[in-house]
Image: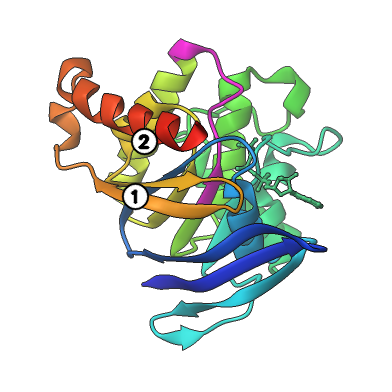
Amino acid sequence: MLEIRSLTIRDGHREILRDLSLRLPESGVTALIGPSGCGKTSVLKWLAGILPLEAQGTVTLDGAPISTPHPALSYQPQSDALFPWLTVAENAALGLRVAGLSARAARARVAPLFAPFGLAGTEDMFPAQLSGGMRQRAAFLRTIVQDSRFVLLDEPFSALDAVTRLAMQDWLAARLSERPRGVLLVTHDLHEATGLADRILVMAANPGRIIAEIPVPLARESRSETALAPLREHLKSLLMEKAR
Ligand SMILES: Nc1ncnc2c1ncn2[C@@H]1O[C@H](COP(=O)(O)OP(=O)(O)OP(=O)(O)O)[C@@H](O)[C@H]1O
């Protein structure tokens, strides 16, 4: 279990986030939704150890305080953030290289994953030669091959067209059922949140805080558009209410 306790983030005198606490179980997807600017990305960046703002709060793993960045957590930023001058294989292996593996060992670890990630044959290509969905899968491969217990995803599908986005959501759900991890997913898309998450945390802004925790009780295979519509309406009204 990963737990954030009492996270407050400030930019000078401005309070961006106030006293946010949340628990991330070992498996399952927790979606973090909320209006633009409420601090969703800041929470992920703080967990990833890359937030350039003053922050107070603790993060514990199985009850013990940890400092970030931490190998139990991998982070995928908003853009796919592949380096254009590296090949797809080099990009995919980058997280492992940063963690200290040799180029050969890192390459050997990522190589068997290209086929299951729908990237067979792209190893020596450059990111610009791939479609948006393929680039997204390469970024996922880089994130997931690190074998971290928890994955922080910041709007991972927002740049994709609707069809590719749906395919990628199914694909992510399949990967997570093969190898469960605790996922914290930031998204603006209520269809995505209700379709993928086991639990949805709703935030409000000024200062950023969690105002509701909503479980998604349906099994993934029963999540039709109709079955999820009342939940989406509920989320929408929570978001609109706080925006007034
Ligand atoms: N490096 C920074 N310096 C100063 N202020 C920042 C910095 N990063 C973020 N902020 C501010 O913190 C607040 C929260 O930003 P953040 O990106 O976390 O929000 P968000 O909920 O992820 O927004 P969006 O949904 O638009 O991506 C915003 O007001 C933003 O301007």
In the shown orientation, is residue 217 left or right of residue 182?
left
Residue placed farthest to the front in the image?
A: 244
Query: Which residue is located at x 57 percent, y 52 percent?
Result: 208
Q: Percent x, y for residue 171?
A: 38, 31
Question: How was the colour assigned to the protein in this rendering?
Answer: rainbow
Residue 159 picture quarter: top right
Report whether the residue tagged 2 is closer than 8 Å to ligand 1: no
Amino acid of disc 2:
Leu
| Neighbours of disc 2 within 10 Å: few (<14), some (14-19), many (20+) | some
What residue is disc 2 on?
238
User: Is the residue marked 1 within 8 Å of ligand 1, measured from its CB?
Assistant: no
Report the number of numbered marks: 2
Mark 2 and mark 1 residues within 8 Å of each other at the beta carbon: yes
Who's the residue at 23% across and 17% down the image?
Answer: 225
From the top left corner, tell me how far across and down residue 226 is, in percent: 17, 16
Residue 132 showing in the rendered view: yes
Residue wearing tag 1: 212
Left or right relative to 94: residue 67:
left
User: What segment carries the magenta color?
Assistant: 152-163
Q: Determine whether the residue tagged by mark 2 lies in a helix, strand or loop.
A: helix
Residue depicted at 36% across the width and 35% down the height: 238
Q: State how far apart marks 2 and 1 are (Cα).
A: 8 Å
From the viewer's perspective, is 202 left or right of 144?
Answer: left
